Amino acid sequence: MSEAIANSGETPSAYRPEISPTTGEVDGPVRSQSDEKSKKKRRLDYPPAPEPLPVPVIDNHAHLDFRDGLVEVSVAQHLDTAQSVGVAGAILVGYDAASSEFAVRAALGDHRAKAAVALHPNDAPHLAETGGYDAAFDRIAELATRPEVVAVGETGLDYFRTAEWGRDAQRKSFFDHIQLASERGLAMQIHNRDAHSDVVAALHDAPSLPSSVVFHCFSGDAELARICNRNGWYMSFSGSVTFKNSHDLREALRIADPHLILVETDSPFLTPHPFRGQPNAPYMVPQTMRLMAEVRGAELSQLCQQVMFNTHQAYGQWTAAR
């Protein structure tokens, strides 16, 4: 491990601009400096490190190719810092061919990372319209054969950003990804935004499903949690469960089957309260885990142990649990 050690209450050294200034040399997309809804300028400094977890867990969903804030942070620095607060590894998630290739390369280069590969549901209609969908999906199918890949994702349905004209293409893409994950014996990570009933219907209509179905950044209510409980589908909770207005989401967490709960950052997005809007990174998982334990009335170390066990059940084991 490098010197990227996080001291509780201080911003980790790798995330401080006076130590790791931005040079513009790191490839990949850059997150907007304005809030998606309010359009107000966000704080671009990374939050202080939380107190380390008593038992390690894994960040189930992270986009480490996305740059945010005032620094450039390597995959190794992200994972070193996360490991120092009890986050033993991360699944790096693709949303197009380039980001999926990045995830596979990163996982090949660091044993603490694994990859998920897919075309994002919001991209599928535009790829179909321009005639590029088949070639892009073929590349995802090729990447899905790599041993570093443990999941197909993120795929699914998004009715917030995609209007009616593009939803047939979105649904076709979702079915293609379901079939791919099932054929390859991989887990599947679902992006579900304002499309709960259609996502559930698509899963029920599919000829076969992967052994592990994961609702990434679970955004449903208690009823969707009950559906997941009945079907054995995993619910991965992000920093959004800590937001003050997330009452339905916390109720879903309360009734979720403990064997189906996972944790993620969706970094650099969805930074947990009270740092909402600031850049996010895997080292912030403990902030979310502590709120999850509080909501469920669970002892933190026991919940961490359960979440780590669930992660290994969903994706296989690649990091050691203490």
Image: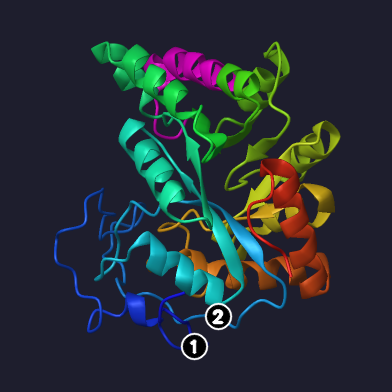
Mostly what secondary structure, the magenta segment? helix
Instruction: Report x, y in % for residue 300.
Output: 77, 73
Q: Nearer the viewer, residue 312 or 306?
A: 312
Residue at x-position 51% and y-position 70%: 82
Instruction: Report x, y in % for residue 237.
Output: 63, 54
Indicate whether 36 appears above or below 225.
below
Task: Examine the structure image and report whether residue 15 is included in the region drawn in magenta.
Answer: no
Q: Residues within 10 Å of mark 2 (few under 14, many from 20)?
A: many
**Mark positioned earlier in the residue sequence (1 or 2):** 1
Q: Nearer the viewer, residue 92 or 1?
A: 1
Instruction: Report x, y in % for residue 56.
Output: 67, 68
Query: Which dot, 1 or 2, sits closer to the camera?
Result: 1
Instruction: Report x, y in % for residue 164.
Output: 42, 18
Q: Which quadrant of the figure contains the C terminus?
A: bottom right
Q: Nearer the viewer, residue 271 or 17?
A: 17
SS class, disc 2: loop
Q: Quadrant of residue 165?
A: top left
Name which residue type carries label 1: Asn
Q: On residue 7, which mark appears?
A: 1
Residue at x-position 46% and y-position 71%: 80
Residue that badge 2 annotates? 50
Residue 244 appears in the picture as rendered: no
Indicate whether 76 appears above or below 198.
below
Q: Nearer the viewer, residue 83 or 31?
A: 83
Q: Which residues are magenta?
A: 159-178
Q: Quadrant of residue 127?
A: top left
